Amino acid sequence: MKSDAVLRIDNLGHDYGKFKVIENISLSIGAGKLSALIGPNGAGKTTFYNAISGKFPPTRGRVFLADEDVTGLPSHRIVDKGMCRSFQITNIFTHLTVQENVAIPLIIQQKKHFKMFGNAFKNGEMIHKVRQVLEQVGLADRGEQVVANLAYGDKRLVEMAIVLARVPRVILLDEPTAGMNPEETENMIRLIKKLASVSGTTFFITEHDMKVVFSLAEKIYVLHQGHLLAEGTPEEIRSNTEVQEAYLGRKVHA
């Protein structure tokens, strides 16, 4: 039976030896939605992301991307299927320019060898695609700058651009505002909202900053001790007493 979900997780579980890190996690995310995964430290968020993004196969359960079973595929195959993860798997090359960094995934996608990198910007189609992506993230005027010379927040934008260059259906954002100052955080929130609205890309984020979560997410999933404790709208999660208790008895503030 065909599903409307672009990402579906069925009864996912993963063990480290005899220790069950995550167990019986099921969720379904529709195309173009902005969802978030939260939970206290040690809840299993990183293991969950690793298992669905191909860093390692889950011990149990299935992962479906637009009804295609991608369970246990290596990360590069899952990227080819349309799900990219940032900002943990993706690395930027600080000695290269902004536009060169964005060109790399396009070269890989076209199955070209890296020795052709020097000719990439003689290709009109390649130049056009790179410029389009840089315009999306607000770096159109910085394409020729070396990444090492950029401010921290702009380096995070380069990482976003690298992921967007693959035109994924689903983007997993792992702590997208970590290390940012308040102004950079607000800029990232606005960018993610804009990208989700304009491109129709599905975003699934994990974040410790609850202001970011409640500013972005249409639906929130809460992990606690490896299990899915709750799911719902920001309002439902904010008022959920079990969620408040999971966060050491403190209420979650937007």
Image (cartoon, grey):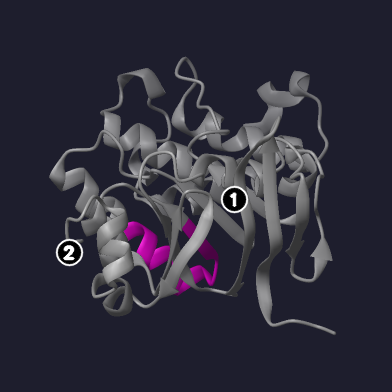
Secondary structure beneath dot 1 equals helix
Q: Which residues are magenta?
A: 191-204
- Image mark for residue 51: none
Question: Is 244 or 56 nearer to us in this picture?
Answer: 244
Q: Is residue 27 above or below residue 94?
A: below
Image location of residue 51, percent across then percent down? 67, 44
Q: Is residue 207 magenta?
A: no
Residue depicted at x 55% and y 51%: 164
Task: Farthest residue to the front: give it.
Answer: 18
Q: Which residue is mark 2?
A: 254
Q: Which of marks 2 and 1 precedes in the sequence?
A: 1
Dominant secondary structure, magenta? helix
Amino acid at circle 1: Lys
Q: Quadrant of residue 11?
A: bottom right
Residue depicted at x 83% and y 65%: 68
Position of 132 with respect to 155 (left or right) is right
User: Distance of mark 1 from mark 2, alpha carbons?
Assistant: 37 Å
